[in-house]
């Protein structure tokens, strides 16, 4: 069998290296014949090299010549012409030149059999394996007969300090010449960090390669030219900062691949039957393109982001150790049908990307199964789901939402900005103010999205086509440009960000708004007032804010010192407020312990100037409350509590809701979520966000209003009682078809971090022909004692006769009703302990008060 080797004078050219015939692999010798045809003229000698049995090159024979044998060309039978001696000498010289040319062309020099080994560690390792194969000058004798006797070997490569400092890389070049190797185990030890390590090829017949490295730095380890028939590849980097692995070309022959590294990169799209990757997790990992039957990810440290979107893997197993923290999964592999995740894994449950269609089996046994674990979705293909060693079904699991997880419920899909187009060019210019009163209706799902403080907005959606339509209750806007946007999102994770709306305003409108909210006043405690002044007009305005606080309270301090403070009046001279800008501040007041319960508390806040204001009625606002003892700090207030049918049906008289909350736990709350399922009788698309104690993001999805206070870090009431309170306030229009006697009962759920939700007492709005729009200023019903064990006294200033009352629990369920009189108390002894809402219907409308029933 011919393998392209030629032998002349007892040697052979094998694979680009000169070797004696006896050393040529397979002991095959290719004989080369030198044929010299002597012609009568100088320089007519010809050298021809052919394999035995090869066809003769077509030549024109001399007259009288004949062919003999199959491999050589014989001389002719005719006598050569007579030549003078000088001519014969020249001819002989030319023949000698041709012969030497043929010999040196066919016979490689000694340097081709020698390879320079630059690495001191590799020289030592090769000489340990085959003594003397590398000389003192670093020249490796690749013709050494002992090479053919090495089939399986473990080689230790000990890189010392001298070699580590010699250059930017360490190159290993001699291993590839160990032709007979089938299994190679490399042990790489470093006494000093090496910037990069390169392996320049491996034996062509290698079937299993294992490399263990200690002492590496996080710089690449290059494995170049892996052999085409390699079946098993194992690379373990045991240093704390494991090296990333770079592979020049991946063979398609791999049955199993085990890698422990900080990252891995290769060329092409190899097929691997079984792939295991151990990862320290200090950095994010984007796995390279591959087709894998079964894939395993193992790690035991911090976990960065893991992106498997470029891998096609049918089965994925993820296992972590006891030191692992939160996981950040970016994307699953393509074609994944089986997913297994085992722990102990994270301090909190992981965030899972959207499970793809085609997933048939999911098994999870990490923490959070009985607490905060949630799933993004349940694909229709999923038939086998095990959570915490128990079979789970679609109705059993918790799906991710802002209530139970910081994981996004769905990827942001549509976003944009709503801005006041001050320069009338239709394009957003940095500095143009937002229109916070705007809302966006997303169809066909009916979601309502609010505007952030900077005018931006975003909403997560499922794949599909959507129409975005802006609206606003703001009285001074003329138009939105454009009137609507469309978004086409065929795939999950896609973004459509080009959805800006430019707002044209009526010019030269001056309108300031004052707003005030107060925490309940309690004897012996501080309470906090939240003050704000908003430029509601269309031109910048200077503003002055004046607070007249109740004389039964004393000043403690404010977040912004007043410019003047005389008696119970504090004044702030504000800078010019730009369009849409709101100035907020807080004031802390103290209620003396001697102030009786039920004492009225009245505050007034005014925003000036008033004379040129478009709507001066909202420049002056009041707080009318009573001093209370113990109270439920998480509640929901409605203002007004009632309207006449004509007012409700007019379509321009909103209801204002205030949701108050307090962290009564023992540690700060990092996140507070308020969820309000809007009942029938309200118009979700008419919502206008008014104010809040802390920055929040809001939206309406599937008829549920969400307020998200991310990173609020709300102190607990023990460490900072005034700072432990908060509130949100919004207004909404009632349905225009509400009739006399209609009631709209609304409650809110308040979630601190991931604790169980706190349900507020119901806020009840009624449609009543006897109601008046000024009921908001009517005195509240006074009750005592509170908390109460058995008998609750009810007092109203206009209580000259019996008045009907109702008592409802937190869910809005009617638990007690009757008629209250001045001479008798309400018997609440049969009620279960807990908070309740008492409502009394009188001439001034419906008045409510909260009380707590105790044993």
Image (tube, rainbow, N blue to C red):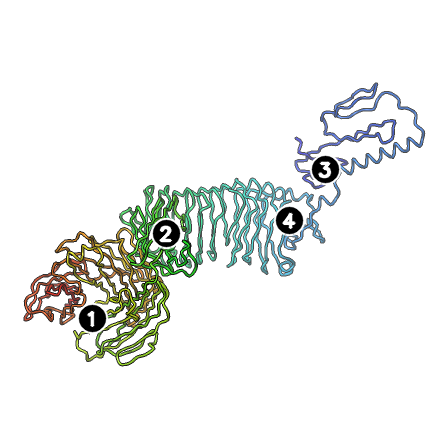
Query: In terms of sequence position, does the residue under pointer 1 or pointer 2 come before the other?
Result: 2
Vertical position of residue 544 compared to residue 250: above or below: below
Query: In terms of sequence position, does the residue under pointer 4 or pointer 2 come before the other?
Result: 4
Query: In terms of sequence position, does the residue under pointer 1 or pointer 3 come before the other?
Result: 3
Question: In the image, is 428 to the left or to the right of 194?
Answer: left
Calculate the distance from the C-alpha at mark 3 to the C-alpha at mark 2: 84 Å
Q: Nearer the viewer, residue 19 or 733?
A: 733
Q: Nearer the viewer, residue 230 or 606?
A: 606
Q: Nearer the viewer, residue 26 or 822?
A: 822
Residue 346: image quadrant is bottom left
For label 4, the residue is 173
For label 2, the residue is 481
Numbered disc 3: secondary structure: strand
Query: In terms of sequence position, does the residue under pointer 4 or pointer 3 come before the other?
Result: 3
Image marks 4 and 3: residues in contact by CB distance under 8 Å: no
Q: Nearer the viewer, mark 4 or mark 2?
A: 2
For label 1, the residue is 624
For label 3, the residue is 12
Calculate the distance from the C-alpha at mark 1 to the C-alpha at mark 2: 42 Å
Label at residue 517: none
The residue that appears at 71% across and 51% down in the rendered structure is 135
Numbered disc 2: secondary structure: strand
Image marks 4 and 1: residues in contact by CB distance under 8 Å: no
């Amino acid at each position: 069998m011919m393998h392209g080797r030629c032998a002349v004078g007892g040697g052979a050219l094998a694979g680009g290296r000169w070797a004696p015939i006896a050393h040529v692999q397979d002991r095959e010798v290719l004989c080369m014949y030198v044929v010299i045809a002597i012609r009568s003229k100088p320089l007519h000698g010809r050298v021809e090299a052919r394999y035995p049995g090869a066809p003769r090159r077509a030549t024109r024979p001399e007259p009288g010549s004949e062919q003999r044998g199959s491999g050589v060309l014989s001389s002719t039978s005719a006598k050569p012409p007579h030549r003078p001696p000088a001519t014969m000498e020249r001819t002989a010289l030319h023949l000698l030149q041709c012969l030497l040319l043929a010999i040196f062309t066919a016979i490689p020099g000694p340097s081709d059999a020698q390879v320079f080994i630059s690495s001191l560690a590799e020289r030592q390792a090769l000489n340990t394996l085959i003594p003397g194969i590398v000389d003192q000058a670093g020249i490796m004798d690749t013709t050494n007969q002992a090479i053919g006797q090495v089939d399986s070997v473990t080689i230790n490569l000990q890189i010392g300090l001298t070699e580590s400092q010699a250059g930017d890389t360490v190159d290993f070049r001699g291993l590839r010449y160990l032709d007979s190797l089938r299994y190679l185990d490399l042990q790489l030890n470093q006494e000093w960090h090496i910037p990069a390590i390169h392996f320049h090829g491996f034996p062509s017949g290698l079937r299993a390669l294992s490399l263990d490295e200690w002492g590496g730095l996080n710089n690449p380890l290059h494995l170049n030219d892996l052999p085409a028939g390699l079946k098993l590849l194992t690379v373990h980097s045991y240093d704390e900062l494991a090296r990333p692995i770079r592979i020049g070309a991946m063979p398609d022959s791999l049955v199993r691949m085990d890698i422990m590294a900080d990252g891995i990169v290769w060329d092409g799209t190899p097929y691997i039957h079984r792939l295991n990757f151990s990862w320290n997790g200090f950095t994010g990992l984007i796995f390279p393109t591959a087709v894998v039957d079964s894939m395993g990810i193992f790690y035991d440290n911090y976990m960065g982001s893991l992106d498997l979107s470029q891998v096609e893997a049918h089965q994925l197993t993820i296992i972590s150790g006891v030191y692992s923290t939160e996981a950040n999964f970016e994307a699953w592999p393509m074609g994944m049908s089986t997913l297994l995740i085992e722990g102990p894994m994270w301090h909190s449950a992981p965030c899972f990307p959207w499970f793809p269609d085609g997933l048939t089996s999911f098994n999870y046994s990490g923490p959070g199964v009985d607490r905060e674990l949630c799933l993004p979705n349940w694909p229709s293909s999923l038939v086998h789901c095990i959570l915490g060693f128990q079979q789970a079904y679609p109705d059993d699991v918790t799906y991710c939402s802002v209530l139970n997880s910081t994981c996004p419920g769905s990827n942001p899909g549509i976003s944009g900005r709503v801005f006041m187009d001050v320069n009338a060019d239709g394009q957003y210019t940095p500095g143009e103010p937002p229109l916070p009163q705007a809302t966006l209706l997303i169809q066909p799902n009916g979601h309502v999205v609010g505007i952030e403080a900077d005018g931006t907005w975003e909403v997560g959606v499922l794949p599909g086509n959507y129409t975005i339509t802006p609206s606003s209750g703001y009285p001074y806007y003329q138009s939105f440009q454009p009137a609507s946007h469309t978004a086409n999102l065929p795939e999950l994770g896609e973004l459509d960000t080009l959805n800006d709306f430019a707002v044209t305003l009526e010019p030269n409108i001056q309108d300031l708004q004052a707003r005030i909210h107060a925490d309940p006043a309690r004897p012996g405690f501080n309470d906090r007032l939240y003050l704000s002044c908003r430029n509601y007009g269309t031109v910048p305005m200077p503003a002055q804010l004046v607070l007249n606080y109740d004389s039964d309270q004393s000043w403690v301090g404010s977040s912004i010192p007043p410019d003047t403070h005389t008696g119970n009046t504090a004044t702030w001279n504000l800078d010019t407020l730009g369009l849409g800008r709101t100035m907020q501040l807080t004031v802390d007041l103290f209620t003396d312990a001697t102030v009786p319960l039920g004492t009225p508390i009245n505050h007034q806040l005014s925003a000036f100037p008033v004379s040129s204001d478009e709507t001066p009625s909202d420049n002056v606002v009041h707080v009318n409350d009573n001093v209370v003892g113990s109270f439920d700090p998480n509640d929901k207030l409605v203002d007004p509590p009632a309207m006449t049918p004509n007012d409700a049906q007019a379509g321009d008289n909103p209801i204002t809701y205030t949701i108050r909350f307090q962290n009564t736990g023992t540690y700060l709350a990092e996140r507070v979520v308020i969820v309000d399922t809007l009942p029938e009788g309200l118009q979700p698309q008419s919502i206008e966000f008014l104010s809040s104690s802390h920055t929040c993001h809001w939206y309406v999805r599937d008829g549920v209003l969400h307020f998200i206070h991310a990173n609020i870090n709300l102190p607990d009431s023990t460490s900072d009682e005034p700072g432990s309170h908060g509130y949100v306030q919004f207004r909404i229009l009632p349905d225009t078809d509400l009739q006399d006697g209609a009631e709209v009962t609304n409650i809110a759920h308040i979630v601190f971090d991931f604790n169980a939700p706190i349900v507020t007492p119901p806020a009840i709005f009624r449609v009543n022909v006897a109601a008046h729009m000024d009921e908001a200023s009517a005195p509240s019903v006074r009750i005592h004692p509170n908390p109460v064990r058995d008998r609750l006294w009810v007092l109203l200033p206009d209580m000259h006769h019996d008045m009907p009352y109702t008592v409802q629990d937190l869910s809005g369920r009617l638990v007690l009703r009757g008629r209250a009189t001045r001479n008798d108390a309400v018997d609440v002894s049969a009620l279960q302990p807990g908070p309740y809402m008492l409502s009394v219907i009188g001439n001034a409308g419906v008045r409510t008060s909260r009380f707590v029933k105790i044993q």
